[in-house]
Image: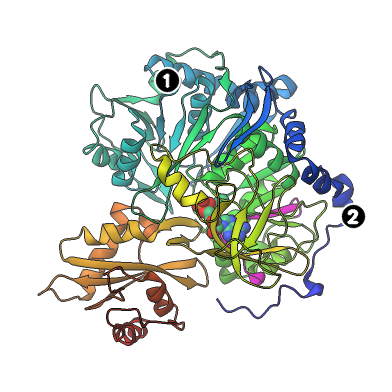
């Protein structure tokens, strides 16, 4: 990405407007100092903001790298999202849902509680017990929220699998979680076309026989196959089920959910989040960073299939009693102003979206947002990858009309909540910087040996103190948990996998992943996952996959492929390979380029050097290649890459 703007320039700083500051949920910068002096006391104070059935005895038990928060406390996440709000105002709208075809459905908090309780009873009826992991494979329809909250209500951790994943990817996750119940739907719309979700489930389940029951939401009424004894309609079950279900009193450290995410090996990691700390962390960050007020209409455009949807569509906003907007479909359907149409129609006041979307809007042109009344907006957010200053400024001017603070929020599946972000009533923001750690959070930029980097110098992002919503372990793989996050420096220091630097004001500028993980349009994809799918194709011998920076998507996938001997690479085979990846992982993982080659850059021990491949794909200097088996392969690959552009 070429960027001519200097984010350090003082004239690009944005100070929150006085009236925003005056009314902000948090506007006294002393909060940072106070939280820093005694972070446990700070989090204890925040924990009082949510409802507990029983109070904790201990705020934090920290045996690095294992943290237990609010030990001894008992609570229920769905109770905090529903019952607690019904008590205040049950007629308040909780969800405004818009289908891609324009259909609108609304749920009050009271209605959402009844639907959730009914489905919680359904789950019990189907034999789901506290501790059983339930897999949810639904698109952005209200039932996904109901299903998540119903699981939380009875203490069954959910594992939501992003609806665009393939049936095979679904199956991998079901098997790892040893889940025997799947909740899905017949189909859903994407750019006017029907995605046959149930068909994907049927294919996926062929290879995981453990699944006993599939609950199917009738969303489109498209033709599907219901297997007798296994598949049951959601609406039939709901009709037969009672509207009251007592929330289970969960221990603070009981698992609330599993969320699979990509790492540096082919196998996705099941990130374990627990109940108390996660609820406290998401509740307070949602309240302070998004400045949620009673009359806000809050729209996070993420999908519930990713952590952003869990923390900032469901648990954070709903525990604050917010009215949330949910949209089923694509931003450019039927026209490129769909988002602005939704903002105008539902009078959204807060919009939280991703840099990749913002860059698409920029490309589509200023006239699309200009056609709509966006004057209800008062705060904007960004998440998923670094936002380049150009996109920040466009967002600020064209959507925020120069008026709305922007919160660039850095966090991860593993962190559960936002860790680095402006507080919109306090922080002077700078385009391209997520600014400062949230109160109570301590972060640093370190070199490989754990020394702090001086301002202006690139290093690695580290979190140097435990926080309530931190990942507790990797499901079934404690060893990987420790190796991945806690062995880079020492067991007190969390390795985020991102590069970062500080500026002279101590603001963090995060540059993106430093490991073999790429963010394609904000979707996290492991290069090893794509490689293993490519080599599963009969004509492929080896594959090396890297991210190439892209103006819209942040990164796109470049796959360097060695074919088996006697097979020649042509355009047809390229298409087949792209399709193979798409159908095995999901369309969001499609390689942008397939480059056939006779060799790949390898160390003498035969390991593919992705660092070198990445430099080649990005047209950058490959650095020292003397340790390669065959240094000549570099020039060959450079030539081939150029030919493909
Ligand atoms: C990775 C985590 C957390 C929600 C969505 C992604 C990148 C995320 C930012 C930001 C720079 C960011 C990082 C991080 N990232 N937000 N504001 N600035 N980079 O969750 O799939 O777990 O991915 O997203 O590289 O490590 P995820």
Residue 520 coordinates in the image, percent (x, y): 46, 61
In the drawing, does residue 253 fall left or right of residue 539?
Answer: right
Numbered label attached to residue 123: 1
Find ligand 1 in the image and state its quadrant. bottom right
Q: Considering only vertical position in the picture, is 166 above or below 459?
A: above
Q: Residues within 10 Å of mark 1 (few under 14, many from 20)?
A: many
Q: How far is mark 2 from mark 1, CA to CA? A: 50 Å
- Name the quadrant of the C terminus: bottom left
**Quadrant of the image occupied by residue 631:** bottom left
Q: Considering only vertical position in the picture, is 519 above or below 24?
A: below
In the foreground, 45 or 523 = 45
Q: Residue at 52% x, 38% y: name it.
A: 472
- From where the camera sits, is residue 188 visible? yes
Q: Residue at 78% x, 43% y: name it.
A: 35
- Name the quadrant of the N terminus: bottom right
Residue 342 coordinates in the image, percent (x, y): 62, 49
Q: Considering only vertical position in the picture, is 327 above or below 132?
A: below
Q: Are marks 2 and 1 in contact (CB under 8 Å)?
A: no
Q: Residue at 21% x, 37% y: name it.
A: 206
In the drawing, does residue 166 fall left or right of residue 161?
Answer: left
Secondary structure under tag 1 reads helix
* Between discs 2 and 1, the one toward the N terminus: 2
Q: Considering only vertical position in the picture, is 152 above or below 427?
A: above
Q: Is residue 317 magenta?
A: no
In the foreground, 398 or 25 = 25
Secondary structure under tag 2 reads helix
The stretch of residues the image draws in magenta is 375-390
Numbered label attached to residue 18: 2
Numbered label attached to residue 526: none
Residue 431 coordinates in the image, percent (x, y): 71, 67
In the drawing, does residue 534 fall left or right of residue 83?
Answer: left
For the residue with label 2, is its CB less than 8 Å from the closest atom of ligand 1?
Answer: no
């Amino acid at each position: 990405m070429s960027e001519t703007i200097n984010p350090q320039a003082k004239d690009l700083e944005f100070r929150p407007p006085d009236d925003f500051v005056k009314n902000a949920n948090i506007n006294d910068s002393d909060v940072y100092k106070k939280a820093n002096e005694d972070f446990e006391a700070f989090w204890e104070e925040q924990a009082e903001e949510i409802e507990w059935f029983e109070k904790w005895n201990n705020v934090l038990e920290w045996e690095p790298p294992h943290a237990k928060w609010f030990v001894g406390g008992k609570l229920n996440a769905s109770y905090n999202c529903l019952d607690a709000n019904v008590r205040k105002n049950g007629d308040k709208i909780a969800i405004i849902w818009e289908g891609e075809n324009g259909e609108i459905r609304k749920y009050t908090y009271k209605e959402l509680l009844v639907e959730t309780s009914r489905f919680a009873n359904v789950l019990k009826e189907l034999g789901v017990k506290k501790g059983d992991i339930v897999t949810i494979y639904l698109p952005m329809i209200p039932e996904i929220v109901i299903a998540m909250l119903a699981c939380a209500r009875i203490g069954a951790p959910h594992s939501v699998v992003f609806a665009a994943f393939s049936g095979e990817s679904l199956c991998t996750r079901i098997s790892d979680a040893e889940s025997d119940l799947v909740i899905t739907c017949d189909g859903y719309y994407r750019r006017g076309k029907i995605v046959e979700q149930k068909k994907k489930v049927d294919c996926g389940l062929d290879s995981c026989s453990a699944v006993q029951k599939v609950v199917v939401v009738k969303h489109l009424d498209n033709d599907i196959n219901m297997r007798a004894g296994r598949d049951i309609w959601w609406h039939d079950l709901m009709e037969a089920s009672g509207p009251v279900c007592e929330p289970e009193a969960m221990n603070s450290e009981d698992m609330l959910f599993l969320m699979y995410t990509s790492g540096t090996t082919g196998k996705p990691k099941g990130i374990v989040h627990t109940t108390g700390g996660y609820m406290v962390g998401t509740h307070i960050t949602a309240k302070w960073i998004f400045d949620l007020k009673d009359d806000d209409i809050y729209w996070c455009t993420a999908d519930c299939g990713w952590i952003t949807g869990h923390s900032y569509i469901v648990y954070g906003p709903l525990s604050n009693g917010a009215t949330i907007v949910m949209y089923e479909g694509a931003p450019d359907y039927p026209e490129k102003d769909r988002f602005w149409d939704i903002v105008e129609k539902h009078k959204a006041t807060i919009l939280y979206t991703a840099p990749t979307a913002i860059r698409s809007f920029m490309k589509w042109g200023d006239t699309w947002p200009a056609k709509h009344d966006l004057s209800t907006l008062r705060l904007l957010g960004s998440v998923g990858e670094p936002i380049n200053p150009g996109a920040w400024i466009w967002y600020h001017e064209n959507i925020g009309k120069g008026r709305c603070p922007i919160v660039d929020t850095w966090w991860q599946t593993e962190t559960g909540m936002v860790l680095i972000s402006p507080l919109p009533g306090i922080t002077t923001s700078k385009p391209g910087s997520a600014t400062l750690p949230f109160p109570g959070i301590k972060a640093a930029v370190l070199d490989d040996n754990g020394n702090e980097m001086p301002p202006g110098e690139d290093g690695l992002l580290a979190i140097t103190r435990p926080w309530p919503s931190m990942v507790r372990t990797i499901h079934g793989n404690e060893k990987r948990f420790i190796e991945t996050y806690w062995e880079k420096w020492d067991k007190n220091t969390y390795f985020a996998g991102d590069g970062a630097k500080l500026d002279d004001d101590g603001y963090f500028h995060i540059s993106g992943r430093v490991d073999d993980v790429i963010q394609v349009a904000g979707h996290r994809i492991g290069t090893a996952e794509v490689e293993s799918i490519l080599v599963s194709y009969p004509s492929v011998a080896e594959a090396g996959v890297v991210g190439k920076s892209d103006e819209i998507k942040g990164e796109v996938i470049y796959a360097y492929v060695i074919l088996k001997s006697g097979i020649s690479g042509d355009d047809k085979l390229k298409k087949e390979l792209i399709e193979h990846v798409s159908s095995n992982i999901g369309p969001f993982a499609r390689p942008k380029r397939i480059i056939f080659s006779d060799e790949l850059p390898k160390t003498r021990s035969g390991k593919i050097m992705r660092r070198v491949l990445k430099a080649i794909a990005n047209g950058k200097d490959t650095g020292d290649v003397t340790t390669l088996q065959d240094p000549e392969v570099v020039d060959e690959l450079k030539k081939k890459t150029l030919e493909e552009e």
